[in-house]
């Protein structure tokens, strides 16, 4: 017993308590190597594959985002181009409508002026026709009045001539009677003979 205790004491003095035994190191290295090999062969490829897939997904997402941004930029450029074209077309349509409106207004003014001139000419022609008709009617009336007046004058002159003839006849008859009558009646008949020319003068 004492010898075994001494051997154990000698072995304890020879070994370092901080360092494991060789068989512990060997048995620890083998599982570690197996675990490392398993990690290297199985876990690390899967992890690398997962990282690669994620990296590809991220890169794909970035590419898709860039493509989407490029498409959005292209769509924005197309929209701006279409908007500019629409604005230019609207301005052209507005200018054309303004020009056509001015032309239509000018044509309406021209037509209105032409119609007004035509109406004025027609009214002037109608006024001239009515004036001519009135002049003809007035001339006719004046002619009728002149004829009536001339007829009245002629008739009056004929009446006066008849009266003058009767007066002359009466005067001659009186002269004959005076010539046949006594001399005392002659002065009484002379004033009667002088009244006829005085009456004719007043006519």
Image (tube, rainbow, N blue to C red):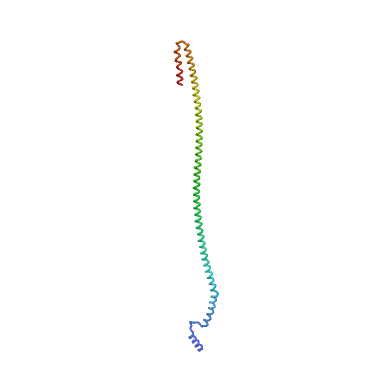
Does 117 appear above or below 195?
Answer: below
Q: Residue reaching furthest bottom?
A: 3
User: Is 93 rendered above or below residue 62?
Assistant: above
Tell how many labels. Answer: 0
Q: Which of these two is toward me, 119 or 161? A: 161
- Along the line of sight, which residue is nearer the eye, 39 or 108? 108
Image location of residue 18, percent across then percent down: 48, 82
Answer above or below: position of 130 versus 71: above
Q: Where does the image place residue 45, in percent across and percent down from the top left? A: 54, 73
Nearest the eye: 14 or 30: 30
The residue furthest top is 182
- Nearest the eye: 131 or 157: 157
Q: Position of residue 107 (x, y in %)?
A: 50, 45
* Up-down relation of residue 179 to residue 138 (above or below): above
Q: From the top left corner, tell me how far across and down residue 162 is, in percent.
A: 50, 19
């Amino acid at each position: 017993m004492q010898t075994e205790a001494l051997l154990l004491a000698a072995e304890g003095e020879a070994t370092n308590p901080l360092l494991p035994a060789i068989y512990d190191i060997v048995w620890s290295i083998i599982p570690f190597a197996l675990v490392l090999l398993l990690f290297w062969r199985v876990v690390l490829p899967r992890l690398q594959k997962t990282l690669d897939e994620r990296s590809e997904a991220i890169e794909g997402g970035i590419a898709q985002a860039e493509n989407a941004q490029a498409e959005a930029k292209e769509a924005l450029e197309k929209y701006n181009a279409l908007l500019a074209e629409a604005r230019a077309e609207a301005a052209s349509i507005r200018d054309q409508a303004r020009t056509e409106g001015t032309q239509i207004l000018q044509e309406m003014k021209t037509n209105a002026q032409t119609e007004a001139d035509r109406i004025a000419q027609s009214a002037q022609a109608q006024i001239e026709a009515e004036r001519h008709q009135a002049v003809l009617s007035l001339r006719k009336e004046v002619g009728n009045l002149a004829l009536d007046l001339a007829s009245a004058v002629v008739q009056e002159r004929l009446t006066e001539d008849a009266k003058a003839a009767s007066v002359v006849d009466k005067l001659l008859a009186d002269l004959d009677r005076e010539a046949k009558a006594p001399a005392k009646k002659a002065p009484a008949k002379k004033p009667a003979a002088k009244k006829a020319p005085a009456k004719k003068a007043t006519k």
